[in-house]
Amino acid sequence: MTAEPTPIDPLAPAETPGDAWDSDRGRARPGSVCPPPGPAGGGGEPTEPAGGGEGTGPRPVPDPPRVVYAFAKNTREEVRATLTGFRGWPVADFRVWINDRATPKGLTVRPEMLGELRRAVEAAERAWREWTEQA
């Protein structure tokens, strides 16, 4: 059973991406208002892996960050999948890069969410194929 996604509050103040993202380092700035990884539907830091499991507290974080996949988005931009950490927690970061500099465009998820992300990409791919076959 998967947890319901946390609804987004449309009235919450928006943060300027440049305020939280350190493009020189390719990660969030310390003390930014980017939410820390936490259980779905809540904030704070997870105490155990999603879906239960043994162990509590942070797990090892790749140091230095490790690019595991990259592809050209267009002639100027590249998308990189990187294993890294945020506030001591391991995360998978999917970020658009221009001239070897990270942009704020991207998605960061806990490793436990990679299966859900894969299912979302597969669903989008199936829907795209169905839509283009009808056209």
Image: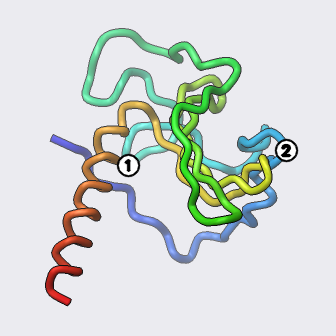
Q: Position of residue 74 (x, y in %)?
A: 60, 65
Residue reaching furthest right? 24
Residue farthest front in this picture? 75
Residue at image position (63%, 23%) is 88
Q: Residue furthest top?
A: 55
**Any mark on residue 92, and which?**
none
Q: Which corner quadrant holds the C terminus?
A: bottom left
Give the residue at x 70% y 50%.
33
Report the side of 27 relative to 46 (left or right).
right
Q: How is the image coloured?
A: rainbow
Q: 87 and 128: which one is in front?
A: 128
Locate residue 92, reporting x and y percent: 51, 36
Q: In this view, does 47 lie above or below 5?
A: above
Do the residues bearing badges 2 and 1 touch, measured as CB atoms within 8 Å? no
- Under circle 1, the secondary element is loop
Q: In which quarter of the image is residue 80?
A: top right
Q: Which amino acid does label 1 sit on?
A: Gly
Can you say which quadrant of the picture contains the N terminus?
Answer: top left
Of badges 2 and 1, the one in the foreground is 2
Q: Please, is residue 105 above or below residue 81 in the view?
A: below
Q: Which of 84 and 34 is in front in this view?
A: 84
Residue 99 screen position, x and y as percent? 79, 53
Q: Residue furthest bottom?
A: 135
Instruction: Write down the quadrant of residue 67 in the picture.
Output: top right
Q: Quadrant of residue 128?
A: bottom left
Q: Read off the residue under disc 2.
A: 24
Q: Which amino acid does label 2 sit on?
A: Asp
Q: Position of residue 30 (x, y in %)?
A: 78, 38
Decide which of tag 2 and tag 1 comes sooner along the chain: 2
Element at label 2 = loop
